[in-house]
Every structure is written in C-alpha cells, then in structure tokens.
Amino acid sequence: MKIIDWYIISKYLGTFLYTLTLFVVIIIIFDLSEKLDDFLTANLTFWQVISLYYAGSIPFYVNMLSPLINFIAVIFFTAKMADQTEIVPILSGGVSFNRFLLPYFVSAFIIFAFNLASNLYVLPYTNRLKNSFENTYVKKGDAYTKNNIHMRLDENTFIYIDNFDNKTKIGSKFNLDKFKGDVLVKKLIAEQITYDSVKHTWRLRNYSTRYINGLKESLTSGAYGTTKDTILDMRPDDFSAYDNVFENLSNKELSEKIKKEKIRGTGVWNDLLFERYKRWLSPLSAFVLTLIGVALSSRKVRGGVGLPLGIGILLSFGYIVLGQFAKMFSLKGGISPLFSVLAPTIIFGLLGYYLLRKAPK
C-alpha cells in the first residue's frame, strides 16, 4: 500500500462516515417530529424513547442508508479529485486504472464486512427493540389479532384457528385434522384454545374429538366448560400479526423457522428465505456501487462535482427502488427469493462493468 492508497482510503471512509452521520441525524429529526404525538400520548420519558426506540432505530437506519451513502460518498470525493486534476497525474504516472481501483475496493471491503456483521449479529437484536416499541406505542388498530389461520404442523397434521389474540394468547374455533395418507383419521374441535406460557402447553375448552376408522367412527367430548391440556408443535409467535417479526430472529432462530415453515405451508416461507438471503448478500452492494461510482466520476467534466453527483443520486434511488420491486415480486409474485435479492446487484454489476470499460484509462 502506497501513500496515495491511504489517501484514497481515508477520503473514502471519511466522506462515507460524515455523510452517513449527517443523513442519520436528519432522518431522526424527521422521525421524531412524526412520532412525537405518539410518544407524548404514551407518557414516555426522554430516556425511554432513547433506550427503547432509537437504540434500535439508529442501527436500522445506518444499515438502510449504507448503499445510498456509499455510492454518494464515492462519487463526491472521486469527482472532486477529478475536478482538481488529481487523478490524471496518478494514471499518467504509470498506474493502471485497475491498480487505481485497489484502495476503493479495500474501503468497500471494510464497509461490506461492517454491514455483514451488522446484518448477522447486531440488527436481529436491535430490531427487537425498535419493532417492539413501534408495535406497542406507534402502530394503530387491532395489531395483536390474526384471523383465519391455516397451518400444517407436520406431514399429517393440519390446524385451523378462526382468530388468535397474541396479547391474551387465546384463539377461538380451533380445528385439528390428522390424516393417514389421504384419509382423515382424527378430527379435534375446540371452541377456545389458550397457551400456557408456564407449562408450554395448549389448553382446549369445550372440545370434542372424533376418531375415524374406515366406516367406523367414535366421538369423545368433555362436558361444557371443561378443559384439556395438550402439547402441539406451535407457539403464539407463529401467529404474529406483525409483518416485521422476521427481522427480530437471530440466524439460528431464522434457520429453525425456515425448516418448520417449509413443512407447515403457512405462506411465509418465501419471506423467511428472502430475509436470510438479504442478510448475507445485500452487503455485496458495497463493491458494485463503488465500481459504478469510480467509473462514473473519474473523468473531469465541465461543471465540477454537480453532474456526476446528480447522476449518482439518481442511480442510488434506482438501486433502492429496484430492490423494493424485487422484494415485492419475490413475496407476492412467486419469484425465487435468492434471485430477487441478487437481481439489483447483478443488474448494477453489469452496468458497472460497462462503465468501467468506458472510463478513461
């Protein structure tokens, strides 16, 4: 590593950190002004808001803004170097353009490693703070109740719950069907089902069980008001009414959840796979956007930094929008979650390769 390499690395990371801090502060100000009424209505103290909400929100904002800020930072300081005729002497001094890219990719690797570690080991825990706070104090409506639940517990067992309240841990109109092959052999019905968080069992109220053996049937039922405890391979968390619950899972919990939901067929398997692939693959954007940023802004243009910076901001938002469309098509349109996560990186990677070939050498 030469002096010029350290110079570029310091410029890159310094601009990135400064711009990221500035944007996070601005977002917090807007977020605070938007949610201030909710905080006051809930009679929350300043310390509660900081420790329970913003301690979880700031890492989320840092991770969300990182691709955008990374791109803007590269374009800003590289275009400034080009405008001040700092790049031309480097290239004319015998340094190849590929060698010139080395400190950029070293910096991109540092950001990549930071974002990957954040995705895997920090965000699942800070998201619990943020989402728990939002679900309790910010989101309106009957956010605890989930209706019309169909779930497969194992290869032969299916359950249905008309509605489940995650606050009281009580569900109504519970049905359990057990099959042997394609033949129904047991049907359990209960007016109410309640989770016992101490015993980790489910309590059935006003229940009846029908056993079917060919043309023979037998029925057992408890007297009205009686209860029965049973063990089922499901938990109240499986019936969360919130869309952000998967963000709170650790990697181990996420892997276990993926295995269960693949069998259950509840419709959230793609959501879980998307979350897993996003954690591992989204940090790759640091390399792709760095490549595009350098190729786009290394040429000296009339007007200084403004033109490449404007193009960079436009492309940054294009990357974010493309990522959101890919997520929507993955969750709702049946596209592979792996492809959806990689699609923006692949498309912009091809764009970066094209711009690199056209960049001044």
Image: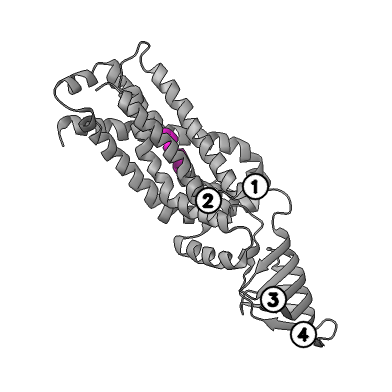
Q: Is residue 297 above or below residue 144?
A: above
Question: Disc 1 to disc 2, how far (Cα)?
Answer: 33 Å
Between disc 1 and disc 2, whose residue precedes? 1
Q: Residues within 10 Å of mark 3 (few under 14, many from 20)?
A: few
- Residue 141, given in percent of the width and then of the height, sits at 73, 50
| Number of numbered discs on residues | 4
Q: Earlier in the sequence, mark 4 or mark 3?
A: 3
Crowd rating for badge 4 (residues with CA inside 10 Å; few <14, some 14–19, many 20+): some
Residue linked to disc 1: 138
Please give the label number shown on residue 182: 3
Q: What crowding class fits label 1: few (fewer than 14 Cα within 10 Å), some (14-19), or many (20 or more)?
A: some
Q: Nearer the viewer, mark 4 or mark 3?
A: 3
Horizontal side, residue 209 vs residue 118: left or right = right
Which residue is labeled 4 in the image? 212
Q: Describe the element under mark 4 as helix, strand or loop.
A: strand
Tell me the distance, in whole angstroms, between the alpha carbons under discs 4 and 3: 13 Å
